[in-house]
Amino acid sequence: MEASKPPSRRILMGEAALAKRPFSSAEIEAEARRLHAKLQAVGYPVEQCRLYAPLTLAINRLKKEKNAVILAHNYQRAEVLFGIADFIGDSLELARKARDTQADIILFCGVKFMAETAKILTPAKKVLIPDMEAGCSLAESISAADVKKLRAAHPEAAVVSYVNTYADVKAESDVCCTSANALKIVEALPNQEIVFLPDNYMARNIQAQTPLGKKIMAWKGLCIVHETFRAEQIAVYRKTYPGIQILAHLECHPDVVKLADYVGGTSGMAKYVAESQAKQFMLVTECGMSDVLRVQFPGKQFIVPCALCPYMKKIHLEKALDVLIREANEITVPEPVRAKAERALQKMFELTS
Protein backbone atom coordinates (compact mmCIF):
# COMPACT_ATOMS: atom_id res chain seq x y z
CA MET A 1 0.00 0.00 0.00
CA GLU A 2 1.19 3.50 -0.72
CA ALA A 3 2.62 5.23 2.34
CA SER A 4 0.34 7.58 4.24
CA LYS A 5 0.48 11.32 3.58
CA PRO A 6 3.07 13.22 5.63
CA PRO A 7 1.79 14.57 8.96
CA SER A 8 -0.01 17.90 9.06
CA ARG A 9 1.65 21.15 10.15
CA ARG A 10 -0.01 20.71 13.53
CA ILE A 11 1.83 17.43 13.99
CA LEU A 12 5.14 19.01 13.01
CA MET A 13 4.65 21.83 15.51
CA GLY A 14 3.92 19.25 18.18
CA GLU A 15 1.25 18.77 20.81
CA ALA A 16 1.37 20.78 24.01
CA ALA A 17 2.68 17.75 25.84
CA LEU A 18 5.57 17.44 23.43
CA ALA A 19 6.43 21.12 23.79
CA LYS A 20 6.60 20.79 27.57
CA ARG A 21 8.60 17.56 27.48
CA PRO A 22 10.48 17.54 24.20
CA PHE A 23 12.61 14.71 22.93
CA SER A 24 16.23 15.17 21.99
CA SER A 25 17.36 14.97 18.38
CA ALA A 26 19.18 11.75 19.24
CA GLU A 27 15.98 10.20 20.62
CA ILE A 28 14.03 11.25 17.54
CA GLU A 29 16.66 9.86 15.19
CA ALA A 30 16.81 6.54 17.04
CA GLU A 31 13.03 6.27 16.94
CA ALA A 32 12.97 7.13 13.23
CA ARG A 33 15.43 4.33 12.56
CA ARG A 34 13.34 1.92 14.61
CA LEU A 35 10.25 2.82 12.61
CA HIS A 36 12.06 2.67 9.29
CA ALA A 37 13.36 -0.83 10.01
CA LYS A 38 9.73 -1.97 9.80
CA LEU A 39 8.04 0.58 7.58
CA GLN A 40 10.51 0.49 4.70
CA ALA A 41 8.81 -2.77 3.69
CA VAL A 42 5.68 -0.78 2.84
CA GLY A 43 7.39 2.16 1.17
CA TYR A 44 7.97 4.65 3.98
CA PRO A 45 11.23 6.62 3.56
CA VAL A 46 13.28 7.40 6.66
CA GLU A 47 12.42 11.10 6.24
CA GLN A 48 8.75 10.32 6.81
CA CYS A 49 9.62 8.19 9.81
CA ARG A 50 11.43 11.20 11.31
CA LEU A 51 8.18 13.15 11.13
CA TYR A 52 6.30 10.38 12.91
CA ALA A 53 8.99 9.76 15.54
CA PRO A 54 7.99 12.53 18.04
CA LEU A 55 4.42 11.23 17.98
CA THR A 56 5.27 7.57 18.50
CA LEU A 57 7.75 8.49 21.25
CA ALA A 58 5.12 10.57 23.05
CA ILE A 59 2.43 7.93 22.73
CA ASN A 60 4.69 5.15 23.94
CA ARG A 61 5.83 7.30 26.89
CA LEU A 62 2.24 8.06 27.84
CA LYS A 63 1.31 4.38 27.67
CA LYS A 64 3.79 3.60 30.43
CA GLU A 65 2.76 6.55 32.57
CA LYS A 66 -0.95 5.79 32.31
CA ASN A 67 -0.68 1.97 32.35
CA ALA A 68 -2.38 1.88 28.97
CA VAL A 69 -2.34 -0.77 26.27
CA ILE A 70 -2.89 -0.13 22.56
CA LEU A 71 -4.74 -2.73 20.50
CA ALA A 72 -4.62 -2.32 16.71
CA HIS A 73 -6.54 -4.18 14.07
CA ASN A 74 -4.70 -5.58 11.06
CA TYR A 75 -6.34 -2.97 8.80
CA GLN A 76 -4.78 0.02 10.56
CA ARG A 77 -2.18 2.36 9.06
CA ALA A 78 1.31 0.89 9.12
CA GLU A 79 2.72 3.64 11.37
CA VAL A 80 0.03 2.81 13.94
CA LEU A 81 0.61 -0.94 13.71
CA PHE A 82 4.37 -0.83 13.96
CA GLY A 83 4.83 2.44 15.79
CA ILE A 84 2.57 2.25 18.85
CA ALA A 85 0.55 -0.99 18.97
CA ASP A 86 1.18 -3.45 21.78
CA PHE A 87 -0.93 -6.09 20.09
CA ILE A 88 -1.89 -6.48 16.43
CA GLY A 89 -4.52 -8.93 15.26
CA ASP A 90 -7.99 -9.73 14.05
CA SER A 91 -11.21 -9.20 15.98
CA LEU A 92 -10.94 -12.48 17.89
CA GLU A 93 -7.33 -12.02 18.93
CA LEU A 94 -7.93 -8.46 20.06
CA ALA A 95 -11.07 -9.41 21.98
CA ARG A 96 -9.00 -11.94 23.91
CA LYS A 97 -6.28 -9.38 24.57
CA ALA A 98 -8.86 -6.90 25.83
CA ARG A 99 -10.38 -9.54 28.09
CA ASP A 100 -7.02 -10.57 29.57
CA THR A 101 -5.11 -7.27 29.85
CA GLN A 102 -4.03 -5.87 33.21
CA ALA A 103 -3.87 -2.32 31.85
CA ASP A 104 -6.07 0.44 33.29
CA ILE A 105 -6.71 2.02 29.87
CA ILE A 106 -7.32 0.36 26.50
CA LEU A 107 -6.75 2.57 23.47
CA PHE A 108 -8.39 0.69 20.61
CA CYS A 109 -7.05 1.57 17.18
CA GLY A 110 -9.84 0.08 15.15
CA VAL A 111 -13.50 0.77 14.52
CA LYS A 112 -16.17 1.50 17.08
CA PHE A 113 -17.74 -1.95 17.39
CA MET A 114 -14.29 -3.33 18.29
CA ALA A 115 -13.82 -0.77 21.07
CA GLU A 116 -17.34 -1.58 22.28
CA THR A 117 -16.41 -5.27 22.40
CA ALA A 118 -13.42 -4.43 24.56
CA LYS A 119 -15.66 -2.44 26.92
CA ILE A 120 -18.20 -5.25 27.08
CA LEU A 121 -15.50 -7.69 28.16
CA THR A 122 -13.70 -5.28 30.54
CA PRO A 123 -16.35 -3.00 32.08
CA ALA A 124 -14.05 -1.71 34.83
CA LYS A 125 -11.45 -0.44 32.37
CA LYS A 126 -11.43 2.83 30.49
CA VAL A 127 -11.70 2.10 26.76
CA LEU A 128 -10.83 4.89 24.33
CA ILE A 129 -10.99 5.16 20.54
CA PRO A 130 -9.05 7.75 18.52
CA ASP A 131 -12.05 8.66 16.33
CA MET A 132 -15.69 8.18 17.30
CA GLU A 133 -16.64 8.34 13.60
CA ALA A 134 -14.75 5.13 12.82
CA GLY A 135 -17.82 3.06 12.00
CA CYS A 136 -18.61 -0.06 9.96
CA SER A 137 -21.07 -0.65 7.13
CA LEU A 138 -21.94 -4.09 8.52
CA ALA A 139 -22.57 -2.88 12.06
CA GLU A 140 -24.71 -0.04 10.79
CA SER A 141 -26.85 -2.33 8.62
CA ILE A 142 -28.79 -3.87 11.51
CA SER A 143 -30.41 -2.82 14.80
CA ALA A 144 -31.60 -4.58 17.93
CA ALA A 145 -35.18 -4.09 16.71
CA ASP A 146 -34.31 -5.98 13.53
CA VAL A 147 -32.98 -8.90 15.57
CA LYS A 148 -36.18 -9.06 17.64
CA LYS A 149 -38.25 -9.23 14.44
CA LEU A 150 -36.05 -12.03 13.10
CA ARG A 151 -36.45 -13.98 16.33
CA ALA A 152 -40.20 -13.70 16.08
CA ALA A 153 -40.12 -14.89 12.46
CA HIS A 154 -37.76 -17.81 13.21
CA PRO A 155 -38.49 -18.96 16.78
CA GLU A 156 -36.58 -22.25 16.42
CA ALA A 157 -33.41 -20.63 15.11
CA ALA A 158 -30.28 -19.66 16.98
CA VAL A 159 -29.16 -16.08 16.35
CA VAL A 160 -25.47 -15.83 15.53
CA SER A 161 -24.10 -12.30 15.27
CA TYR A 162 -20.80 -11.56 13.60
CA VAL A 163 -18.61 -9.46 15.88
CA ASN A 164 -19.04 -6.62 13.35
CA THR A 165 -22.17 -5.49 15.19
CA TYR A 166 -22.89 -2.96 17.89
CA ALA A 167 -23.52 -3.86 21.51
CA ASP A 168 -27.32 -3.71 21.32
CA VAL A 169 -27.35 -6.30 18.52
CA LYS A 170 -24.93 -8.57 20.36
CA ALA A 171 -27.22 -8.30 23.38
CA GLU A 172 -30.14 -9.75 21.41
CA SER A 173 -28.05 -12.63 20.04
CA ASP A 174 -27.37 -16.14 21.31
CA VAL A 175 -23.72 -16.14 20.39
CA CYS A 176 -21.18 -14.01 18.57
CA CYS A 177 -18.59 -15.13 16.06
CA THR A 178 -15.66 -13.79 14.06
CA SER A 179 -14.51 -14.61 10.56
CA ALA A 180 -11.95 -16.94 12.16
CA ASN A 181 -14.51 -19.08 13.98
CA ALA A 182 -17.88 -18.51 12.26
CA LEU A 183 -18.13 -21.99 10.73
CA LYS A 184 -17.10 -23.66 13.98
CA ILE A 185 -19.73 -21.70 15.92
CA VAL A 186 -22.51 -22.57 13.48
CA GLU A 187 -21.61 -26.26 13.53
CA ALA A 188 -21.31 -26.35 17.34
CA LEU A 189 -24.87 -25.12 17.91
CA PRO A 190 -27.60 -27.79 18.28
CA ASN A 191 -30.10 -25.75 16.25
CA GLN A 192 -30.76 -26.79 12.67
CA GLU A 193 -31.81 -23.26 11.76
CA ILE A 194 -29.41 -20.34 12.14
CA VAL A 195 -30.13 -16.65 11.72
CA PHE A 196 -26.74 -15.25 10.77
CA LEU A 197 -26.15 -11.50 11.11
CA PRO A 198 -25.37 -9.19 9.46
CA ASP A 199 -23.03 -10.19 6.58
CA ASN A 200 -24.98 -11.66 3.66
CA TYR A 201 -21.94 -12.99 1.80
CA MET A 202 -20.45 -14.59 4.90
CA ALA A 203 -23.74 -16.34 5.66
CA ARG A 204 -23.87 -17.70 2.11
CA ASN A 205 -20.25 -18.84 2.28
CA ILE A 206 -20.85 -20.64 5.57
CA GLN A 207 -23.96 -22.28 4.15
CA ALA A 208 -21.82 -23.66 1.31
CA GLN A 209 -19.14 -24.92 3.70
CA THR A 210 -21.11 -26.61 6.45
CA PRO A 211 -21.59 -30.36 5.90
CA LEU A 212 -24.33 -30.62 8.52
CA GLY A 213 -27.26 -29.56 6.37
CA LYS A 214 -28.19 -26.62 8.56
CA LYS A 215 -30.38 -23.88 7.15
CA ILE A 216 -28.83 -20.44 7.43
CA MET A 217 -30.98 -17.33 7.11
CA ALA A 218 -28.92 -14.34 6.01
CA TRP A 219 -29.34 -10.64 6.62
CA LYS A 220 -28.71 -7.99 3.94
CA GLY A 221 -25.55 -6.38 5.30
CA LEU A 222 -22.39 -6.09 3.20
CA CYS A 223 -18.85 -4.91 3.88
CA ILE A 224 -18.05 -1.87 1.75
CA VAL A 225 -14.51 -3.19 1.29
CA HIS A 226 -15.12 -6.83 0.45
CA GLU A 227 -18.16 -6.33 -1.75
CA THR A 228 -15.95 -4.52 -4.28
CA PHE A 229 -14.02 -7.63 -5.32
CA ARG A 230 -15.20 -9.58 -8.37
CA ALA A 231 -14.54 -13.09 -9.64
CA GLU A 232 -13.46 -11.77 -13.06
CA GLN A 233 -10.80 -9.69 -11.33
CA ILE A 234 -9.45 -12.72 -9.46
CA ALA A 235 -9.36 -14.80 -12.64
CA VAL A 236 -7.22 -12.17 -14.39
CA TYR A 237 -4.68 -12.15 -11.58
CA ARG A 238 -4.56 -15.95 -11.52
CA LYS A 239 -3.71 -15.94 -15.23
CA THR A 240 -1.20 -13.09 -14.94
CA TYR A 241 0.69 -14.62 -11.99
CA PRO A 242 0.87 -18.41 -12.46
CA GLY A 243 1.27 -20.18 -9.13
CA ILE A 244 0.02 -17.26 -7.06
CA GLN A 245 -1.85 -18.20 -3.89
CA ILE A 246 -5.15 -16.35 -3.54
CA LEU A 247 -6.46 -15.78 -0.02
CA ALA A 248 -10.02 -14.44 0.22
CA HIS A 249 -11.82 -13.08 3.24
CA LEU A 250 -15.03 -14.82 4.26
CA GLU A 251 -16.87 -11.51 3.68
CA CYS A 252 -16.23 -11.71 -0.09
CA HIS A 253 -18.85 -12.68 -2.67
CA PRO A 254 -19.30 -16.48 -2.99
CA ASP A 255 -18.08 -16.36 -6.59
CA VAL A 256 -14.79 -14.87 -5.37
CA VAL A 257 -14.52 -17.42 -2.56
CA LYS A 258 -14.84 -20.30 -5.06
CA LEU A 259 -11.67 -19.14 -6.83
CA ALA A 260 -9.52 -18.83 -3.71
CA ASP A 261 -6.89 -21.19 -2.36
CA TYR A 262 -7.76 -20.19 1.18
CA VAL A 263 -10.89 -18.63 2.69
CA GLY A 264 -11.13 -17.21 6.19
CA GLY A 265 -10.19 -14.32 8.41
CA THR A 266 -7.01 -12.30 8.62
CA SER A 267 -5.39 -14.45 11.32
CA GLY A 268 -5.91 -17.50 9.13
CA MET A 269 -4.37 -15.66 6.19
CA ALA A 270 -1.25 -14.90 8.21
CA LYS A 271 -0.95 -18.54 9.27
CA TYR A 272 -1.40 -19.72 5.68
CA VAL A 273 1.35 -17.40 4.41
CA ALA A 274 3.69 -18.45 7.22
CA GLU A 275 3.27 -22.14 6.40
CA SER A 276 3.17 -21.89 2.60
CA GLN A 277 6.21 -22.48 0.39
CA ALA A 278 4.74 -20.16 -2.26
CA LYS A 279 6.43 -16.81 -2.97
CA GLN A 280 3.49 -14.80 -4.35
CA PHE A 281 0.19 -14.15 -2.62
CA MET A 282 -2.87 -12.05 -3.29
CA LEU A 283 -4.93 -11.09 -0.26
CA VAL A 284 -8.50 -10.34 -1.24
CA THR A 285 -9.18 -8.08 1.70
CA GLU A 286 -8.40 -4.61 3.08
CA CYS A 287 -4.99 -3.20 2.11
CA GLY A 288 -3.69 -3.02 5.66
CA MET A 289 -3.42 -6.80 5.92
CA SER A 290 -0.96 -6.92 3.03
CA ASP A 291 1.11 -4.26 4.81
CA VAL A 292 1.24 -6.40 7.95
CA LEU A 293 2.45 -9.43 6.02
CA ARG A 294 4.95 -7.47 3.92
CA VAL A 295 6.65 -6.49 7.17
CA GLN A 296 6.43 -9.95 8.70
CA PHE A 297 7.48 -11.86 5.58
CA PRO A 298 9.93 -9.68 3.61
CA GLY A 299 10.96 -12.59 1.40
CA LYS A 300 7.45 -13.03 0.00
CA GLN A 301 5.60 -10.91 -2.54
CA PHE A 302 2.08 -9.60 -2.06
CA ILE A 303 0.13 -8.64 -5.16
CA VAL A 304 -2.74 -6.17 -5.08
CA PRO A 305 -5.72 -5.64 -5.62
CA CYS A 306 -6.83 -4.47 -2.25
CA ALA A 307 -9.36 -1.94 -1.08
CA LEU A 308 -9.11 0.70 1.64
CA CYS A 309 -11.58 0.85 4.52
CA PRO A 310 -12.39 4.55 5.00
CA TYR A 311 -13.42 3.87 8.59
CA MET A 312 -10.21 2.10 9.60
CA LYS A 313 -8.14 4.83 7.98
CA LYS A 314 -9.77 7.50 10.18
CA ILE A 315 -7.34 6.42 12.88
CA HIS A 316 -3.90 8.04 12.85
CA LEU A 317 -1.12 8.96 15.26
CA GLU A 318 -2.17 12.54 15.90
CA LYS A 319 -5.65 11.45 17.03
CA ALA A 320 -4.24 8.61 19.13
CA LEU A 321 -1.93 10.99 20.99
CA ASP A 322 -4.62 13.61 21.54
CA VAL A 323 -7.11 11.07 22.90
CA LEU A 324 -4.53 9.46 25.18
CA ILE A 325 -3.47 12.85 26.58
CA ARG A 326 -7.05 13.89 27.34
CA GLU A 327 -8.43 10.39 27.96
CA ALA A 328 -11.20 11.42 25.60
CA ASN A 329 -13.57 9.49 23.33
CA GLU A 330 -14.39 7.02 26.07
CA ILE A 331 -16.62 4.12 25.05
CA THR A 332 -19.64 3.47 27.26
CA VAL A 333 -22.22 0.68 27.11
CA PRO A 334 -25.34 0.67 29.34
CA GLU A 335 -24.96 -2.11 31.90
CA PRO A 336 -28.12 -4.10 30.96
CA VAL A 337 -26.99 -4.14 27.32
CA ARG A 338 -23.38 -4.86 28.26
CA ALA A 339 -24.27 -7.84 30.45
CA LYS A 340 -26.40 -9.47 27.76
CA ALA A 341 -23.81 -8.80 25.06
CA GLU A 342 -21.09 -10.27 27.28
CA ARG A 343 -23.05 -13.53 27.51
CA ALA A 344 -23.08 -13.80 23.71
CA LEU A 345 -19.33 -13.16 23.56
CA GLN A 346 -18.55 -15.58 26.38
CA LYS A 347 -20.61 -18.22 24.57
CA MET A 348 -18.31 -17.70 21.57
CA PHE A 349 -15.24 -18.28 23.75
CA GLU A 350 -16.83 -21.41 25.25
CA LEU A 351 -17.64 -22.94 21.88
CA THR A 352 -14.16 -22.27 20.50
CA SER A 353 -12.00 -22.86 23.58
Image: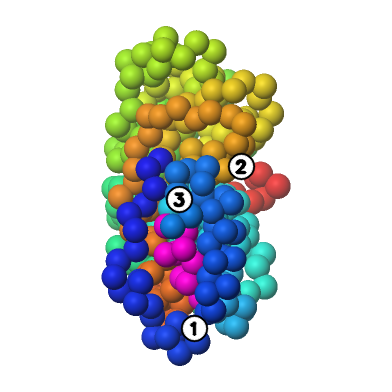
Residue 67 lies, in percent from the top left, at: 61, 79
Image location of residue 249, percent across then percent down: 46, 33
User: Residue at the location (51% across, 50% down)?
Assistant: 39
Q: Quadrant of the N terminus?
A: top left
| Residue 191 place in picture, x, y as percent | 54, 36
Residue 129 visible: no
**What's the CA distance linking mark 3 and mark 2?**
18 Å
Q: How many angstroms separate mark 1 from mark 2 (CA)?
A: 32 Å
Say which residue label 1 marks: 22
**What residue does disc 2 label?**
296
Camera-nearest residue between 322 and 173? 322
**Contact check, label 3 and label 1, Cβ < 8 Å:** no
Q: Which residue is mark 3?
A: 45
Q: Secondary structure at mark 3?
A: loop
Residue drawn at (52%, 79%), measured in percent from left and top?
Answer: 23
Badge 3 density bin: few <14, some 14–19, many ≥20, Cα 10 Å: some
Q: Which numbered disc flags the more N-terminal residue, 3 or 2?
A: 3
- What range of the chain is rendered magenta? 48-58
Q: Is residue 67 above or below residue 320?
A: below
> First in sequence: mark 3 or mark 1?
1
